[in-house]
Amino acid sequence: MEFLSIRQVVQSSVLSKRWKNIWKSLATLSFKPFNEIHKYNRSLSHVLSNRDHYVFLHNLHLTVFISIAPKLLNDAIKYVALHHLQKLTLYIDFKFKEISNSFVPLIFNCQSLTFLDIFISSSRSSLKLPPSLLLPSLETFHLSNVTFSARDNDCVEPFSTCTSLTTLMLRHSMHH
């Protein structure tokens, strides 16, 4: 079931009484786009609020649209930070609009992350990252269309605290 989108997993719960609540304890969640954004937002909120909170969440793939509520995105990132997430893939589809970065501090203080992939689909906007990323367990880091902030001395050292980092991939990223 971990290879299915969360929508398919929840739909499969009607197949058997034994499967009714199995989706609540999955360690991998994949939120892929629906046709209707309102249903997508409701689905994300429903799954995270009804999931078994005692089960660690190891892997999350989340597609974020321009019309997703910023509070919902913040709540989702808070949830994964509190549930010892290890792998996070964020595909952010914010075309021609400024990307709200209120969720950024929540991600970059998640001590359990070992894999992080952030892909911003728009070339006209980028995600501004903090000067330092507090990710000591991070081993693999993929970034696309992000802007690095400089410290007071105009020096950029975002990876200095990522002591376990072995793979870094930067695409269309810049120093600000």
Image: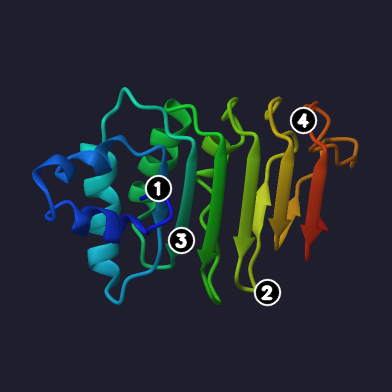
**Which amino acid type is marked by label 2?**
Ser
Q: Is residue 7 above or below residue 49?
A: below
Which residue is label 1 attached to? 29
Which residue is label 2 attached to? 123
Label 3 element class: strand
Q: Nearer the viewer, mark 3 or mark 1?
A: 1
Do callouts 2 and 3 mark residues in contact (Cβ within 8 Å)?
no
Query: Is 14 or 104 nearer to us in this picture?
Result: 14
Classify residue 82 by image quadrant: top left
First of labels 1, 4 by sequence position: 1
In-image side of 103 versus 137 (left or right): left
Q: Is residue 122 above or below residue 133?
A: below
Q: Nearer the viewer, mark 1 or mark 2?
A: 1
In-image side of 166 versus 35 (left or right): right
In-image side of 158 versus 123 (left or right): right
Do callouts 2 and 4 mark residues in contact (Cβ within 8 Å)?
no
**Which amino acid type is marked by label 4?**
Cys
Real-space Cα separation, disc 1 to disc 2, in angstroms: 27 Å
First of labels 2, 3 by sequence position: 3
**Which amino acid type is marked by label 1?**
Leu
In-image side of 66 versus 128 (left or right): left
Mark 3, other Cα within 10 Å: few <14 / some 14–19 / many ≥20:
some
Real-space Cα separation, disc 1 to disc 4, in angstroms: 25 Å
